[in-house]
Image (cartoon, rainbow, N blue to C red):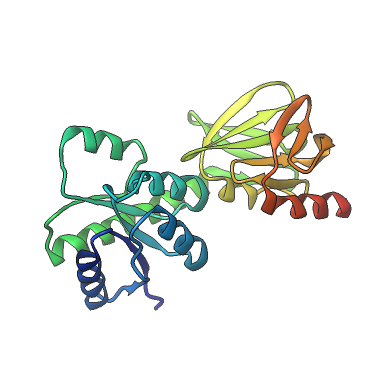
Amino acid sequence: MKKTKILVVEDEILIADNICKTLKNLGYETLEPAINYTEAMLTIKKEQPDFAILDINLSGKKTGIHIAQQIRSLYNFPFVFLTANSDLATLNLAKEVLPNGYLIKPFSKEELFTSIEIALHNFSKEKTKDNQEEIEHKNALFIKDKGNYTKIIFDDILYLKSAHVYTEIFKTNKQKLVIRGSLNDILSKLNKNFVRIHRSFIINVKHLEQITSSTVKIKDVLLPVGKKYNKDLVNTINLL
């Protein structure tokens, strides 16, 4: 059975090493610990961990909460927060990014194991539920909305925008739908007319009116084009 790959983000090296050692003893695979936001995001992009333990209070301007926001919007895997502060203000900030658990320092080996396993189990159940609520069709997507299934015709979609753990879908009739899930999750369910142009945007190229090196125009709406996505956009247009 494949071992769960875990990233520890902790700016106190000794603590990070001790956590990794404990995780290995518990049977998990550990990555090289990250000590700040930049290191964490590079490791996540390169190694694609299955789980993360994030210290909330990191050195530097960006905290573990900033990392959690990126995980929710771009990668969608479970994580727990690690902190020595259990005050209400910190807890409220943490709750906004919907962590899968919360560990208070100091914690025991048993508490660490339990937090990880419960988080993984709940995440798996939630993902299965989400998959059951989204029925794919050749030219449309059915998404559960307030107990009912809403049919979204692909041709009626102008573009999609990331909103942390949610995705906003902008339609040709000026209607906006908000669904739970990352852009990566939604993109895998769309057809070849959809292409990612930015970490926060996916467009339907059938409605593309204008393209420059840094923007696209979709029905009079200007959207940014990220440098690393420009080539994919051009290739998609050329194949249509």
Residue 184 to residue 153: above or below: below
Classify residue 81 as left or right of residue 210.
left
Q: Residue at x 62, y 39 (%)?
A: 142
Tell me if 68 is positioned left or right of 89 in this view: right
Residue at the outermost front position: 60
Location of residue 177 in the rendering, given as x and y in whole percent from the top left corner: 59, 28
> In the drawing, does residue 221 fall left or right of residue 75?
right
Which quadrant is home to the N terminus? bottom left
User: Residue 99: x percent and y percent?
Assistant: 32, 46
The percent position of residue 216, horizontal first and vertical second, equals: 76, 36
The relative height of residue 196 versus residue 177 in the rendered view (above or below) is below
Out of 216 and 1, give the one closest to the viewer: 216
Can I make out residue 129 in this image?
Answer: no
Q: Nearer the viewer, residue 159 or 41?
A: 41
Farthest residue to the top: give it: 174
Count of numbered tags: 0
Residue at 28% x, 59% y is 10
Q: Which is nearer the eye, 98 or 221? A: 221
Q: What residue lies at 18% left-to-right and 33% top-to-bottom?
A: 88
Residue 32: which quarter of the image? bottom left
Along the viewing direction, whichever of 235 and 56 lies nearer the viewer? 56
Image location of residue 70, percent across then percent down: 46, 47
Q: Which quarter of the picture shows residue 109?
A: bottom left
Residue 40 visible at all:
yes
- 160 over 47 or under it: above or below: above
Would you place residue 7 above or below residue 190 in this image?
A: below
